[in-house]
Amino acid sequence: MNRIMPSSYYTPETLAQLYQLPKSTIWKWIREKKLKDVIKIGKHYRIPCSSREEFERKHKIG
């Protein structure tokens, strides 16, 4: 089992692994603005750690 270490940003793929959800769910949350302050760099997206924490508080996860 791979351990996912916290960093200041997550990729959509990393969050999908962390939550054990399909990547399409993370992309849906990004489109629906459920994950805030997502950064797009070229074709790559990064989700700030603070956005994940806010999402978890709001949805009572963890």
Image (cartoon, rainbow, N blue to C red):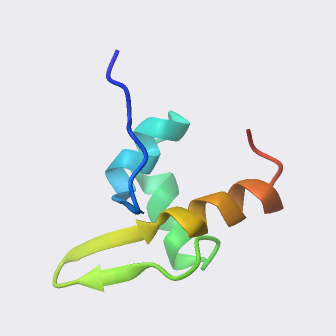
Residue 61 rendering spot, x and y as whole percentages: 75, 44
Q: Is residue 37 above or below residue 12?
A: below
Q: How many marks?
A: 0
Residue 16 rendering spot, x and y as whole percentages: 44, 45
Residue 22 rendering spot, x and y as whole percentages: 44, 43
- Toward which corner of the image does residue 1 lie, by quadrant? top left
Is residue 15 found left or right of 35 in the rendered image? left
Q: Nearer the viewer, residue 48 or 33?
A: 48
Q: Is residue 5 above or below residue 10?
A: above
| Residue occupying image coordinates x 35% and y 70% | 46
| Residue occupying image coordinates x 51% and y 54% | 25
Is residue 61 found left or right of 4 in the rendered image? right
Q: Residue furthest left?
A: 42
- Toward which corner of the image does residue 10 lie, by quadrant? bottom left
Q: Nearer the viewer, residue 19 or 57?
A: 57
| Residue occupying image coordinates x 73% and y 38% | 62
Residue 32 rendering spot, x and y as whole percentages: 60, 77
Q: Residue furthest top?
A: 1
